[in-house]
């Protein structure tokens, strides 16, 4: 099968998200100017550079109480900071609950029954108990093609790692089983690893 996106795919569901998988989930926490802590998962998320460490995520929808975007992007534009919380399999239900569309004056932390911990380098909260969190300052918000597509770029200013995930000086992802996004309503978790030596090693 071959199709051009501009002409449609003719399938029951869009296959694009199922093709670009697995995708790490950035559980993005922000704080509004009213002091309310927002939390939402984004699967268009990844690291973009090592030195200095930088990350990105994309927001692709709107809310009726925000002008052309979602709470996360709106808050980041105002505050200039955000935190990326890494999602483990054990937190899948809380992550899913935080994706609900709720009013901007209601915190997803409370809605999902999560505890806040104040970040060290930015005025923002992170999710208590996550395997890792990346505290970020805003680099840029880029408007992408499409009605409500925005790319958010950030520089990491602080990194939290849960102590039990550090083994012999290595951040061991098998200790918490990272949750990844697939297509449709599907997810996966990472349990098995293998290593490959690079040709120049």
Image: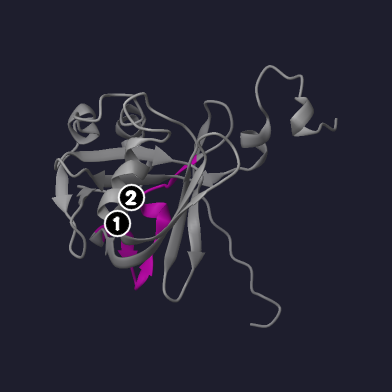
User: Under tag 2, what secondary structure?
Assistant: helix
Tag 2 and tag 1, C-beta contact below 8 Å: yes
Q: Residues within 10 Å of mark 2 (few under 14, many from 20)?
A: some
Q: How many marks?
A: 2
Q: Is the C terminus in the top left, top right, bottom left or bottom right quadrant?
A: bottom right
In the rendered image, residue 74, in percent from the top left (x then y), is placed at 33, 42
Residue corresponding to mark 1: 80
Please report the residue visible at 42 percent of the width from the left and 47 percent of the height from the top: 178
Q: Nearer the viewer, residue 57 or 113?
A: 57
The disc at residue 61 is none
Left or right: 26, with 12 as reference point: left
Neighbor class of circle 1 (other Cα within 10 Å; few <14, some 14-19, many 20+) is: some
Q: Which residue, as the protein is rendered here, is positioned at the far top?
A: 12
Which residue in the rendered view is the most extreme toward the front? 67
Q: Residue at x 29, y 56 (%)?
A: 81
Magenta part of the protein: which range? 164-180
Spot occupied by residue 8 in the image (x, y as percentages of width and height): 75, 25
**Towards the viewer: 97 or 37:** 37
Give the residue at x 38% y 27%: 63
Colouring of the image: one colour
Mark yes or no: residue 87 visible: no
Tell me where residue 123 appears, x and y as whole percent. 18, 56
As drawn, the label of residue 77 is 2
Residue 6: image location, x then y, percent: 75, 31
The picture quadrant where one finds residue 200 is bottom right
Quadrant location of the N terminus in the rendered image: top right
Q: Nearer the viewer, residue 77 or 181?
A: 77
């Amino acid at each position: 099968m071959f199709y051009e996106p501009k002409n449609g795919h003719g399938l029951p569901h869009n296959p694009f998200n199922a093709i670009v998988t697995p995708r790490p989930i950035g559980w993005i926490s922000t704080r509004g100017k009213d002091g309310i802590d927002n939390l939402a998962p984004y699967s268009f998320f990844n690291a973009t550079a090592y030195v200095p460490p930088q990350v990105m995520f994309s927001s692709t929808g709107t809310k009726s109480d925000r002008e052309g975007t979602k709470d996360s992007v709106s808050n980041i534009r105002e505050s200039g900071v955000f935190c990326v919380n890494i999602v483990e399999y054990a937190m899948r239900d809380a992550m899913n609950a935080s994706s609900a569309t709720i009013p901007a004056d209601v915190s997803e932390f409370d809605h999902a029954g999560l505890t806040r911990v104040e970040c060290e380098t930015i005025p923002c909260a992170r999710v208590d108990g996550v395997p890792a969190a990346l505290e970020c300052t805003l680099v840029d918000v880029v408007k992408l093609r499409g009605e409500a597509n925005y790319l958010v770029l950030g520089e990491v200013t602080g990194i939290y790692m849960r102590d039990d995930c550090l083994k012999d000086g290595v951040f061991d992802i098998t200790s918490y089983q990272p949750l990844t996004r697939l297509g449709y309503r599907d997810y996966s978790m990472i349990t098995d690893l293998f290593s490959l030596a690079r040709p120049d090693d």
